[in-house]
Image (spheres, helix red, strand yellow):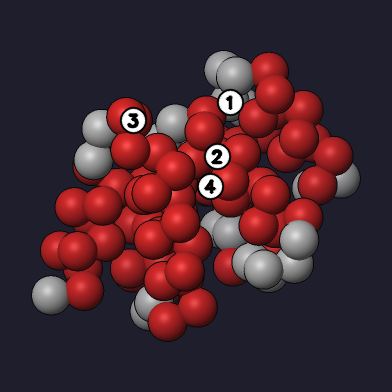
Amino acid sequence: MVMGAVSGLGDISSDDDTQVSTLLLEALPRLNEENLGMALGGLVRTPARSIALLDAIAAKKVPTLKVTDAHRKALLESTDPAVRTRAMDLFK
């Protein structure tokens, strides 16, 4: 059930980025590894969600170690310059 909820949230259109980001970020500490991967995938899906994730990492609300190599790479190689620059600053 949790997997379906996390997956569904990640698939919501970008019109709801703020709400989706908030819900996914609040859930991160309680998710198992598989669901964490899906939540991070939903968070790196759009520039607005990526920035929300990076803000949470910068504020130490999300430990850097929770971000998988694949999701870190997605942030560092984002087509959005603001996401890419912010990620480079945080993951140096």
Give, as a three-letter code, the residue at label 2.
Answer: Ser
CB under 8 Å between discs 1 and 2: yes
The kind of residue on which mark 4 rests is His
Residue 15 against residue 35 in the figure, above or below: above
Query: Residue 78: which disc?
Result: 1
Above or below 22: residue 72? above
Label 4 or label 2, whichever comes before in sequence order = 2
Q: Which residue is mark 3?
A: 14
Crowding around mark 4 (Cα neighbors within 10 Å: few <14, some 14 to 19, many 20+) is some
Q: Amino acid at mark 1?
A: Ser
Dot in front, 4 or 3:
3
Category of crowding for the residue at label 1, using alpha-carbon neighbours closer than 10 angstroms: few (below 14), some (14–19), many (at least 20) = some
Q: Which mark is residue 68?
A: none
Mark 3 or mark 1: which comes first in sequence? 3
**Earlier sequence position, callout 1 versus callout 2:** 2
The residue carrying mark 4 is 71
Amino acid at dot 3: Ser
- The residue that appears at 70% across and 63% down in the rendered structure is 64
The label nearer to you, 3 versus 2, is: 3
Q: Secondary structure at mark 4?
A: helix
User: Pointer 2: what residue?
Assistant: 50
- In space, the residues marked 4 and 3 are separated at their CA atoms by 18 Å
